[in-house]
Amino acid sequence: MPREFKRVVLKLSGEALREPGSHDNISPEIVEGIAHQIKAAHEAGTEICIVVGGGNFWRGASAAGRGMDRATADYVGMLATIMNSLAIQSMLDAVGVESRVQTAIEMTDVAEKFIRRRAIRHIEKGRVVIFGGGTGNPFFTTDTTAALRASEVGADIIFKATNVDGVYDKDPNKNDDAVRFEELSFNEALSRNLRVMDGTAFTLCQDNEIPIVVFDMNEDGNIQKALSGADLGTIIS
């Protein structure tokens, strides 16, 4: 049965915007394809917010492991998420979807500062809201940003777009006998140490009763299908 929800958060990795095998940091063609899928779901009546990572440009934890101060490395990563947010906004504009970028780090020449009530008002007016800059704090991932913003704007669900078609009991890329789950409870995911999201993000979702759907974004049309309520991937609730 299709799932029904009104307001959703779509979590995209930064790598999802980069063409495979290319050194280009953002693929306009891939971003345009994502924008078209978001448009189709948006026109069907779904209220959509987006959180995007910055891994196509920078990974703070990786840079910290090579000697850079961790807090500074994370701030660089936050700026990378803003670049990706602006690219998504540009393509949404190009396909006729009104959108706003709100950032946790103030950058008024290119985006709005995140203000919860303003974000909700944009959503109510039918705009797609893109949250950039992470939480504005180092040591937190964009998974945590997605969970936090979903809680703040009253989203019904979080969609985490990945490179696998759901949550498995072990790494499917390394184990042929890996089993995919269709549904999981938060407690089952925790007890099995499945690492659906980082611990802070997962706890926020559990405490605020926000289900998470993990699905494969590489299949043609899957973002649109997921946002529109199709039965895809694994749901944790």
Image (tube, rainbow, N blue to C red):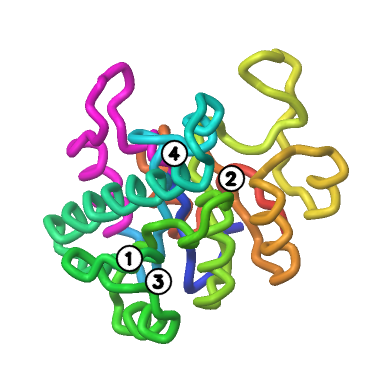
CB of mark 4 within 8 Å of CB of mark 3? Answer: no
93 with respect to 166 (left or right): left
Q: Nearer the viewer, residue 82 or 39?
A: 82
The label on residue 214 is: 2
Residue span colored magenta: 13-39
Q: Label 4, on which residue? A: 217
Q: Residue furthest right?
A: 191
Q: Secondary structure at mark 3?
A: strand
Q: Label 3, on which residue? A: 47
Q: Compare marks 1 and 4 and give the one earlier in the sequence.
A: 1
Q: Given the image, on which type of amino acid does mark 3 rest?
A: Glu
CB of mark 4 within 8 Å of CB of mark 2? Answer: no
Q: Compare marks 4 and 3 and give the one earlier in the sequence.
A: 3
Q: Secondary structure at mark 1?
A: helix
Q: Relative to residue 195, is residue 5 depicted above or below? A: below
Q: Compare marks 3 and 1 and give the one earlier in the sequence.
A: 1
Q: How far is disc 4 from disc 2 in space, using C-alphas?
A: 9 Å
Q: Nearer the viewer, residue 112 or 20?
A: 112
Q: How far is disc 3 from disc 2 in space, using C-alphas?
A: 19 Å
The label on residue 75 is: none
The image position of residue 54, as x and y in percent, is: 39, 42
Q: How far is disc 2 from disc 1 in space, using C-alphas?
A: 20 Å
Q: Compare marks 3 and 2 and give the one earlier in the sequence.
A: 3
Q: Given the image, on which type of amino acid does mark 4 rest?
A: Met
Q: Secondary structure at mark 4?
A: loop
Q: Counting other residues with Cα less than 10 Å from the Cα at mark 4, is it few (<14), some (14-19), or many (20 or more)?
A: many
CB of mark 3 within 8 Å of CB of mark 2? Answer: no
35 with respect to 195 (left or right): left
Q: Label 1, on which residue? A: 42
User: In the image, what residue occupies the spot 66% across and 21% down?
Assistant: 172
